[in-house]
Amino acid sequence: MANSGTATTRKYRVAVTATEDFPVSLPSVRQALKGVASIKIVPLPFRPLDTVEETKFAEMFSGVHGDQPPRSGPLRLLVH
């Protein structure tokens, strides 16, 4: 396939775990990921999960990237 000369931008989807016990500055996350990734907020409890909860939250993480870094390098974000 010939290169058309236009850059293809792949948009990623990342999960952000945010709860009252573990709050996240979502405006900062949205600003940092603007144009790079869409955000899925997962209210993952900040405690051990039972088997039923593990299954529930594993399903909530489906469709997000993170199992492999983007080809251009890993996306690392730490917001306090």
Image (cartoon, rainbow, N blue to C red):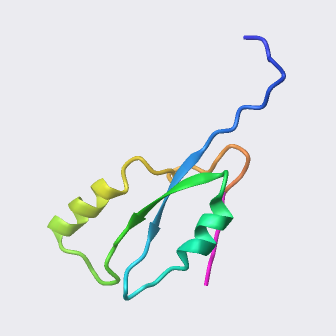
Magenta stretch: includes residue 77 = yes
In the rendered structure, the answer to whether residue 76 lies left or right of residue 65 reads right
Extreme residue in the top direction: 1
Q: Quick check: can you spot residue 69?
A: yes
Extreme residue in the bottom direction: 21
Q: Residue sitting at 42 percent across and 76 percent down? A: 18
Is the residue 45 above or below the residue 30 in the image? below
Query: How many numbered circles are shown?
Result: 0
Magenta stretch: includes residue 74 = no
Looking at the rendered image, the quarter that the N terminus falls into is: top right
Instruction: Name the one closer to the observer, 45 or 68.
Output: 45
Extreme residue in the left direction: 52
Residue 65: image x %, image y %?
51, 50
Residue 73: image x %, image y %?
72, 51
Instruction: Name the one closer to the observer, 60 or 40.
Output: 40
In the rendered structure, the answer to whether residue 64 lies left or right of residue 53 reads right
Residue 66: image x %, image y %?
52, 54
Residue 23: image x %, image y %?
46, 84
Q: Which residues are magenta?
A: 75-80
Q: Residue sitting at 27 percent across and 80 percent down? A: 48
Q: Residue sitting at 67 percent across and 56 percent down? A: 74
Q: Quick check: can you spot residue 76?
A: no
User: Residue 59 is drawn in which quadrant?
Assistant: bottom left
Is the residue 2 above or below the residue 46 in the image? above
Q: Could you tell me what secondary structure mostly forms the magenta stretch?
A: loop
Extreme residue in the right direction: 5
Instruction: Name the one closer to the observer, 25 or 80.
Output: 25
Is the residue 65 above or below the residue 48 in the image? above
Q: Residue sitting at 61 percent across and 51 percent down? A: 69
In the rendered structure, the answer to whether residue 36 lies left or right of residue 56 reads right
